[in-house]
Image (spheres, rainbow, N blue to C red):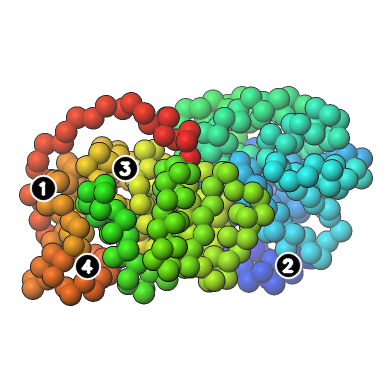
Amino acid sequence: MTKFTDFGLNASLLRAIGEAGYENTTPIQKQAIPAVLDGKDMIAIAQTGTGKTAAFSLPIIHRLLAGEGRRTPRGARALILAPTRELAIQIGENISSYIKHLHLKTTLVYGGASANQQIKSMAGGVDILIATPGRLLDLMTQKHIVLDTAEYLVLDEADRMLDMGFIRDIQKIIARLPVSRQTLLFSATMPASVEKLANSILRNPVRIEVTPAATTAEKVTQHVLMVAKEQKRALLAHVLKDESLRRVLIFTRTKHGANKVARQLNDLGVHSDVIHGNKSQNARQKALSNFRAGEIRALVATDIAARGIDVDDITHVINFELPNEPESYVHRIGRTARAGARGASLSFCDHEERAYLRDIEKSIRQPVPVFTDHPFHVEGMSAPAASTQEKPAAGRGNGRNGGKPRRPEANAGAPRNGDAARQKPRRRSGRGRRTQQAAA
Ligand code: AMP
């Protein structure tokens, strides 16, 4: 076990880390902290929940304290770029807790909130600026923020920033930073677009990979429930009868879909809320804090809105609709099983979504067992090629359990029937994948 005290970090920083309850490093911290302290550029494949925020911010804080640099008006010594306001806020909260015994200044700059306050908070300069690309570029263009003396740059969730179309903004921002900076890039996945960006902005980077997709997926007990599209609402009502689904994050592909599910939950009397791109910053924050506090049982979200949701103790992730990008599946189910806990995911798969399921299974390199013991199971709809079918235990007929929902995770043993796996998969057309993503 590597302890935070092994790195020779600043004593006040160590005190705050101790107060945050951290003692041993996570794998990414163990690798990243010494390399960043050494002044190296870094590319890290790591997902939320791995402790990546501390992995980059602790050594940067230490170096800011040890270095000669000083705050300059409208400037920042370290810039952390994040794809969403939610993630920026979370990073800000973490950093504020790490620097609470130090005289460092930090602030946030993101869209959807008044720019005036942000301009004011940047006037005297800060040590650490956490920002989303769009608003930052606006304020840089208006000369309210000047980053020509920045010493550190972190791109967090780079894959998602590119997915969201931020590449141009990011390039423009980086063009105004000094070349002699230290740059760290974090990404949950490493598609070619991220590699390309990394190659253009990192110098001899150390490469760290701590959570290949399969590893996260292994910590989550996953099941897929085959259901006709028009029965998904009834299935959702059915599974939510089980009270062990205590804190549930429900995903849809689109904002419209999220609203529909939220209305249904409301009709069912399930305390819930919804977050997506059309919700105001305040509404999103309120929904998140109610979810965190346990005041609402279910939170409905689209993929993009859910980025950076930092809520421990999510008992279940329900994919009301399967994502059309396998990476999103890993991101989604990774919201449960955080900080070493185990979690469960239930994916509702209709006929049309079977192709998505196949892509997902390829990506996570494992089949997702089919859970058949519910009243809406569609027998005729075979599992996709890679999938294995999980039969209900003896004496449990489909839907003949008196309407009492059964906990899928209780049945998570080895699949016993591979018949469906031998059926030929249908070909699919790849059309519409991007379009649906854009709608989220
Ligand atoms: P992150 O991956 O940065 O979103 O961190 C996930 C969660 O783990 C956050 O709530 C952190 O506060 C927490 N965390 C990070 N590092 C440690 C650690 N070494 N020990 C305990 N908790 C940690």
Q: Position of residue 391 (x, y in %)?
A: 13, 61
The label on residue 360 is 3
State left or right for residue 111 relative to residue 349. Answer: right
Q: Earlier in the sequence, mark 1 or mark 2?
A: 2
SS class of the residue under badge 3?
A: helix
For marks 1 and 3, give the one nearer the viewer.
Answer: 1
Does mark 3's beta carbon lie closer than 8 Å to ligand 1?
Answer: no
Looking at the rendered image, the disc whose residue lies closer to the viewer, 1 or 2, is 1
291 displayed left or right of 106: left
First in sequence: mark 1 vs mark 4: 1
Up-down relation of residue 263 to residue 408 (above or below): above
Left or right of 50 on screen, residue 122: right
Between 310 and 27, the residue placed more toward the observer is 310
Say which residue label 2 marks: 16
Q: Given the image, on which type of amino acid does mark 4 rest?
A: Asn
Image quadrant assignment for residue 141: top right
Q: Residue furthest front?
A: 267
Name the kind of residue labelled 2 in the image.
Answer: Ala
Give the CA separation, mark 4 to mark 3.
21 Å
Q: Between label 1 and label 4, give the one nearer the viewer.
A: 1
**In this image, 382 relative to 341: left or right?**
left
Q: Is mark 4 within 8 Å of ligand 1?
A: no
Q: Residue visible at 16% across and 66% down?
A: 399
| Type of amino acid under label 3 | Ile
